[in-house]
Image (tube, helix red, strand yellow):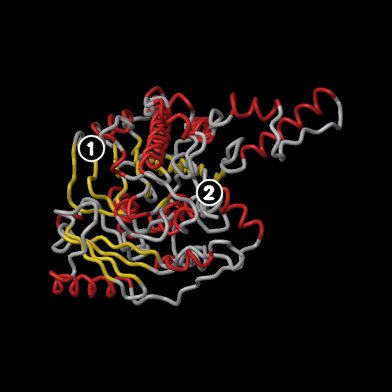
Amino acid sequence: MKDFNILLIILDAVRADHLSCYGYHRETSPVIDKIASEGTLYKNAISASCWTLESIASIFTGLLPNRHGAHWASQKIDNNVKLISEYFNSNDYRTFCLSNNDCFFNEDTGLAKGFKHFHNIKYIFYPTKDLNCFHKMANELYQKIFYTRYRFNLNTNETNFLKKIYKKYLLGKFHIGAAETNYRLKRLIKDCLKSDSPFFGTVLYIDAHLPYRPPVKFINKFTDDKTLESRLNNINFDAKKFMAGKISMDEKDFHVLNCLYDAEISYIDSKIGEIYKFLENKGLLDSTMLIITSDHGENIGEHSLMDHRYCLYDTVLRVPLIIRFPQAFKANSIVNNIVQTTDIFPTLLQLLKNDETAHINAFDGVSLFDRPNLKENYAFSEYLYPQPVSKDDDDYNELRKFMHSIKAVRDSDFKYILYSDDTEFLFDIRKDPDELNNVIEANRKTAMEMKQRLLEKTGEFREIHVVADLDSNYKERLKSLGYL
């Protein structure tokens, strides 16, 4: 097949079952729905992990976390592992990446390797620090206009006019992460058009990641209940405090979180619509493989959890995977069999028919075209090390109960989950897709067979590092994404 452009869009923390094309009861994703109708939608796409670094590294290498080496204990891809970006860079593609996650998707973790252009984009009002950012920007603007050294002080409990302006007119309304990403993306693609070489581009939108701060007009699409308004500005985004039992949340609180989460997805969907139109107007739509997926999903109260750490339930593992490329993927096609995000790399190599590189990393993933032909079709996922908790963390004792490594394997009928303390779960996902009933006692033989398959593929558990002494800069970056 002739060389073609590739645009890989990764939606951070977007679970499949909150997209309308996956059967969600709200219309959250009309643009993505349209793209799915013009391409192939994979109904049961499984991520290799429940958090960004491990899962994106798996997408980029076609390997499970135990083989690519990027996890909480090391946070860097092994040097001998080749990334999809390195492959395309060495094959005369113009490579670029725009990431909104500077905590894990950056040069330090090795995920930037192979990209000729790599840029991390932050919000003007950064999550959890937006008041401080507004404070700084307001002072700089005031001093520049009036040539004075006077500084506003917003870091007090008292309410002043600047705080009132911030809360009324700015909080939640400036949300330019995806907007600036699109602006830069269009410029990069325009620049690529000056060359005869095709491009391989990656975009990571982080808008659906905690804390949820969607633009107001998207909130209004999903919150017509006026009784919820008082909760919107006071809802808890601190997953750690909730899971440590320090903050209680009821059904209405999680309803509000779902509304905000859906509004974020709707916002991202609108931005994908901008890119779709741009590619169409430039005559690039049909010559560009458009891949839409996610690194992981999100818990919004399910299993008494928030965000995506400490578990391998389908709320965090079942992700969207949609591919639009008329030359190879049928329009309006739905694939029900299990696939993995590790399959993306080997699929692209098969399409390019490059036999010499067909086994770059001896992939754990399988080409999407070969998946239906497998005699035994399994999906594997890992949480190699639990997110570390610092000794000086106020919630250290309460969070210790989550300090387990986790592995999971599934086929079309059952899903088996194994914790490093030997706790086991077996779910009949045909009858129990929400994974609420552990049926391991009634299906011991199935559980043992799946456990054997899982350990053969992923190996034994490694030593767990429960406590981490994190430096101040890294702590700040983790706080910006709600991890601390």
Name the amino acid type tagged 1.
Answer: Gly
Q: Find the residue positioned furthest to the right.
A: 148
Label for residue 344? none
Q: In which quarter of the image is the N terminus?
A: top left
- The numbered mark, 1 or 2, whose residue comes first in the sequence reads 1
Q: How crowded is mark 1: few (under 14 residues within 10 Å), some or many (20 or more)?
A: few
Q: How crowded is mark 2: few (under 14 residues within 10 Å), some or many (20 or more)?
A: some
Label for residue 481? 2
Q: Which corner quadrant of the image does residue 467 belong to?
A: bottom right
Name the spot of residue 31 as percent of width and height, x first: 33, 29
Distance of label 1 from label 2 (alpha carbons): 29 Å
Q: Report the residue marked by disc 1.
A: 23
Q: Which corner quadrant of the image does residue 20 belong to?
A: top left
Name the amino acid type tagged 2.
Answer: Leu
Q: Which of 476 and 360 is in front in this view?
A: 476
Q: Which of 40 and 258 is in front in this view?
A: 258
Q: Residue at x 21, y 64 (%)?
A: 438
Q: Which residue is drawn at 60% across and 29% down?
A: 167
Q: In this view, does 6 lie to the left or right of 72?
A: left
Q: Which residue is drawn at 39% across and 45% down?
A: 250
Q: Which corner quadrant of the image does residue 261 belong to?
A: top left
Q: In which quarter of the image is the C terminus?
A: bottom right
Q: What element carries label 2?
A: loop
Q: Is residue 294 above or below residue 472?
A: above
Query: Does any portion of residue 96 appear in the rendered image?
Result: no
Q: In this view, does 190 lie above or below 47?
A: above
Name the spot of residue 264 as percent of width and height, x first: 43, 35
Q: In this view, does 144 lie above or below 428?
A: above
Query: Does any portion of residue 54 appear in the rendered image?
Result: yes
Q: In this view, does 385 lie above or below 276?
A: below
Q: Nearer the viewer, residue 333 or 397?
A: 397
Name the spot of residue 359 as percent of width and height, x first: 32, 63
